[in-house]
Image: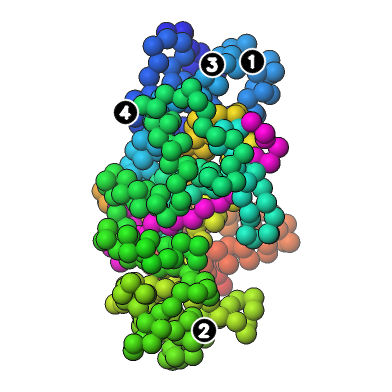
């Protein structure tokens, strides 16, 4: 093996603890990332991983003064273009172990969900990219070259973790096909075959892999592009309920032996009485194969005279809970925006092979997982079991009441020696600070002169 300069491959101090705590490199080795010679996979992965945090791209890094200490361009591109590496296995290990760490921080009454959605993966300037296809962006009505990034994520309403993804191509509007010399025994070839499947066939396989990895959830959230009866039935067969937006199309709903459109179903529904004025009506109905669902109609935010329909296969929860749970779906939209705008998805490497697209997308997802875990640790206000009790034992040994009293007395002495204007300022600020303290802390403080 080549002797590797650890100093040039170090993580920033801000993310190093989380990188070790989540055992990122250990999951990489468990997924079978190995090389017979040259730089190790762990070294090359970490090198690409930290590019973002050093505010450099690969070209600028090699052009810098320290460029000679890094491996050549070919070494990194061979690593990213390798079709035999199980990137999906690595992402599954990393996401499932992170979710396992998050779940003890989540209350038992909090619902965890799977979120399914797709987003544009644009390569508009490309011509020779493998499996490149043309798609229509339904939000703008424009066409783009690239892929559909179908993503499965997990969320508890506080933290979103990407679990699986597939870069989907198109059979009808395909610009380039599969590379002929690819080894059909590799995981890279299996990802290419999957890319040519329709999304409703890929989603159940994603959920199966997530469940087999130990990730648990109660609901699958999706938007109106996926709420079709065959996919809903497939998810129900796996023991999960579905909550999703419904389009006003040609689908029919069964009510009392009648087949109704969504518009007719709205007028048949019962108005909801309650404080939540956004919820208009609700009704129990059946999809055409006989799937019982609850349909909830809510007011459109930007178009007050219009309404939106949300479908739920769990008939035991109230309308307000259906809307609250469906609101968690927005986490995946935030994830897409963050991955593209901040984590350099689509932009950092411009390769032609499908393997490079998969490998780099996986690295971007792993960056997001690490940042999501750090964010959860810094913002979560729940106790951490034994760590909380150890902290209480340590705090109880400190005579904090005496220390706080001495600090206030010190500030009073400084105020007396200062000018009158500064004295008034210090006393005013001190009074405001003491007034904001909890009562159980005020009880330990003596009567201060600045409070008079």
Q: Secondary structure at mark 1?
A: helix
Which quadrant would residue 200 be assigned to in this image?
A: bottom left
Q: Which residue is mark 2?
A: 263
Q: Position of residue 2 (x, y in %)?
A: 46, 8
Left of 318 or right of it: where is 117? right
- Dot 4, how many residues are within 10 Å of its Cα: few (below 14), some (14-19), or many (20+)? few
State whether residue 117 is above or below residue 317: above
- How far apart, in angstroms, are the residues tagged by discs 2 and 3? 59 Å
Q: Earlier in the sequence, mark 1 or mark 2?
A: 1
Colouring used for the render: rainbow
Frontmost of labels 2 and 4 is: 2
Q: Which residue is mark 4?
A: 30
Frontmost of labels 1 and 3 is: 3
Asked if residue 319 can be seen in this view, the reply is: no
Residue 108 drawn in magenta: yes
Residue 313 drawn in magenta: no
Q: Position of residue 301 (x, y in %)?
A: 60, 76
């Amino acid at each position: 093996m080549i002797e590797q300069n650890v100093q040039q491959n170090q993580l920033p101090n801000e993310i190093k603890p989380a990188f070790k705590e989540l055992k990122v490199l250990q999951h990489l080795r468990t997924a079978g990332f190995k090389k017979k010679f040259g730089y190790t996979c762990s070294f090359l992965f970490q090198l690409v991983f930290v590019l973002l945090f050093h505010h450099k791209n690969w070209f600028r890094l090699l052009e810098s003064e320290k460029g000679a200490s890094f491996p050549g361009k070919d070494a990194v591109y061979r690593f990213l273009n390798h079709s035999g590496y199980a990137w999906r296995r690595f992402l599954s290990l990393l996401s499932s172990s992170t979710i396992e760490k998050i779940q003890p921080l989540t209350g038992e009454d909090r619902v965890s969900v799977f979120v399914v959605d797709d987003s544009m993966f644009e390569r508009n300037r490309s011509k020779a990219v493998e499996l490149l296809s043309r798609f229509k962006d339904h939000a703008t009505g424009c066409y783009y070259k690239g892929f559909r990034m179908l993503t499965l994520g997990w969320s508890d309403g506080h933290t979103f973790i990407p679990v699986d993804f597939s870069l989907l191509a198109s059979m009808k509007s395909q610009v380039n096909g599969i590379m002929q010399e690819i080894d059909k025994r590799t995981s890279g070839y299996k990802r290419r075959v999957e890319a040519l499947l329709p999304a409703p066939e890929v989603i159940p396989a994603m959920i199966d892999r997530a469940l087999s990895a130990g990730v648990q959830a109660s609901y699958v959230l999706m938007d109106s592009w996926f709420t079709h009866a065959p996919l809903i039935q497939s998810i129900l067969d796996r023991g999960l309920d579905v909550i999703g937006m419904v389009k006003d199309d040609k689908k029919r709903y069964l009510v009392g032996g009648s087949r109704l459109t969504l518009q007719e179903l709205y007028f048949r529904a019962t108005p909801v009485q309650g404080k939540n004025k956004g919820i208009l009506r609700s009704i129990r109905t059946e999809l055409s194969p006989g799937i019982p669902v609850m349909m909830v109609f809510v007011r459109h935010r930007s178009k007050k005279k219009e309404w939106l329909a949300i479908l739920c296969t769990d008939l035991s929860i109230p309308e307000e809970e259906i809307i609250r749970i469906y609101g968690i779906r927005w986490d995946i939209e935030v994830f897409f925006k963050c991955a593209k705008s901040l984590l350099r998805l689509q932009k950092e490497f411009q390769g032609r092979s499908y393997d490079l697209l998969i490998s780099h997308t996986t690295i971007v997802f792993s960056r997001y997982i690490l940042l999501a875990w750090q964010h959860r640790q810094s913002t979560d206000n729940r106790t951490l079991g034994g760590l909380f009790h150890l902290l209480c034992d340590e705090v109880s040994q400190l005579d904090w009441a005496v220390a706080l009293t001495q600090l206030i007395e010190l500030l009073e002495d400084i105020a007396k020696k200062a000018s009158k204007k500064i004295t008034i300022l210090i006393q005013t600020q001190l009074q405001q600070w003491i007034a904001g303290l909890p009562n159980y802390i005020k009880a330990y403080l003596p009567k201060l002169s600045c409070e008079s």
